[in-house]
Image (tube, rainbow, N blue to C red):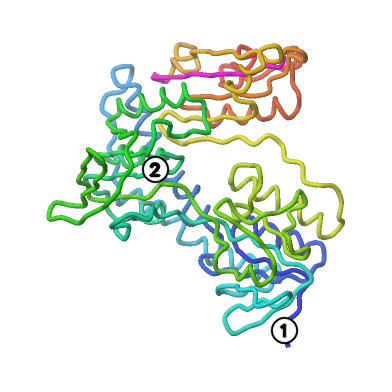
Amino acid sequence: MAEQYDVVVIGGGPAGNAMASGLKAQGKTVLIVEADLWGGTCPNRGCDPKKILLSAVEARQAAQHLQGQGLIGAPKIDWPALMAHKRGYTDGINDGTLNGLKGQDIATLHGQAHFQSDNQLAVGDRVVSATDYVIATGQRPAILPITGHEYFKTSTDFLDLDQMPKRVTFVGGGYVGFELATIANAAGADVHVIHHNDRPLKAFDADLVKDLMAAMTADGITFDLNTDVQAITKTATGLQLTADNFELTTDLVISSAGRIPNADQLGLANVGVTFDRHGIQVNDHLQTANPHIYAIGDVSDTPVPKLTPVAGFEARYLVGELTHPGAAIKYPVVPTQVFAAPKLAQVGISAAAATEHPDEYRVNTLDMTKWFTYYRFGAQQAQAKVVVAKASGQVVGATLLSDVADEMINYFTLLIEKHVTLPDLQRLVLAYPTPASDLQYLY
């Protein structure tokens, strides 16, 4: 006879853990299943370890910007020591997460979950059953299906390198390619980013993407655009990448061509749940085609960026939905960013979308490089495009390119969500001089 629970959560990452903890606090009997590392991608092999590695990159960059302006000699990155620093954090995530779940008296199982039939979920040789199921299995790196694809490594491999190779190539110009290229370049590698067309980071403002690429090129990164890699061949001198009228030999090739949902091993066809390369299809209550199965986080096909904070937001919503059913989910504006050098971030309505409606919106395009906030630390570039609704005077969108764009975008997220006008903002006294004190000049 199958073990019975109120809810079985499949996936022990940020979404699944938040889901399990929230339901347990509401008195539900909960089982959480994880096939890989407890804690999921973000803390083990994603945003957290990436940001630890970037901490050294940011410190090195800050020192470089002030050469001859108060500092002499820029630091070099000690990759093995930096990796040890990263592992000092990540090595404890799996056990710490599992112990945290057990401490809440949440039942756990380790293994691949597979729906055998409606209300029958197998995990290894165990069969469990529940009133409701929540799929929170996330995504994994996509591997391009080209000749020699077995030579590809992924972001997972990069974030655990013992040594930085002399030559590193990223195939795919998205978030991962730009961010990891920034790290590899700062660590001394000869870095190429190959992209199949001339528009990497296509979700971001085209002008500011070009400015970011120019800055990264000046730092020594090579962008090979309109290049569709066809094969990887191992040679005596390294790995040779070939495309039409293109050849490149490198030591490490990272497939940074996006991510795919971890939905293909769950037996979803057995329970009437559909998915494609964008994720598991859900309605506006995060419910799949099977009324007792839900999907949240990166594995779901929802109209928002696949980000850890979004996964947590969806988990909190669904905890409420499974205890006191109510309204459809309503997402706030979601900031997104690329942790390159400089950083690129955006939230709300884009400048491109705003220019299509000139009667409704005004776009403020600003070069802030010489503003005090940026002058003081020798910033090489600080740009902003801020969208203001003409009727209300409220900020409705922003795209930023600067060393502090990751901090500033959160301020803009608050301004948009709280409908703050310039007079509203000027009724506040913010600490000066800080990036926040610049906000009033961006309306």
The amino acid type found where label 2 is placed reads: Gly
* Residue that label 2 marks: 172
The answer to whether 434 is drawn above or below residue 233 in the figure is: above
Q: Position of residue 129 (x, y in %)?
A: 73, 77
Single out the residue that lies furthest toward the bottom.
1
Could you say whether the residue bearing mark 2 is in a helix, strand or loop? loop
Q: Which mark is residue 2?
A: 1
User: Compared to 320, does 63 lie above or below?
Assistant: above
Q: Which x, y percent locates residue 168?
A: 27, 45
Residue at 41%, 26% in the rendered image: 212
Q: Is residue 164 left or right of residue 119?
A: left
Horizontally, is 175 left or right of 27 in the view? left
Image-quadrant location for residue 425: top right
> Which amino acid, by three-letter code, is at mark 1?
Ala
* In-front residue for pair 246/201: 246
Taking the spot 61% from the left edge, 34% from the top edge, the residue there is: 335
Label 2 neighbour load within 10 Å: few <14, some 14-19, many 20+: many
Residue 304: percent from left, percent from top: 64, 42
Residues shaded magenta: 377-389
Of all residues shown, which one is farthest toward the front? 244
Q: Is residue 369 magenta?
A: no
Residue 85: horizontal and vertical position, in percent? Answer: 39, 51
The residue mark sitting in front, 1 or 2, is 2
Kind of element beneath mark 1: loop
User: Does the segment drawn in magenta span residue 379?
Assistant: yes
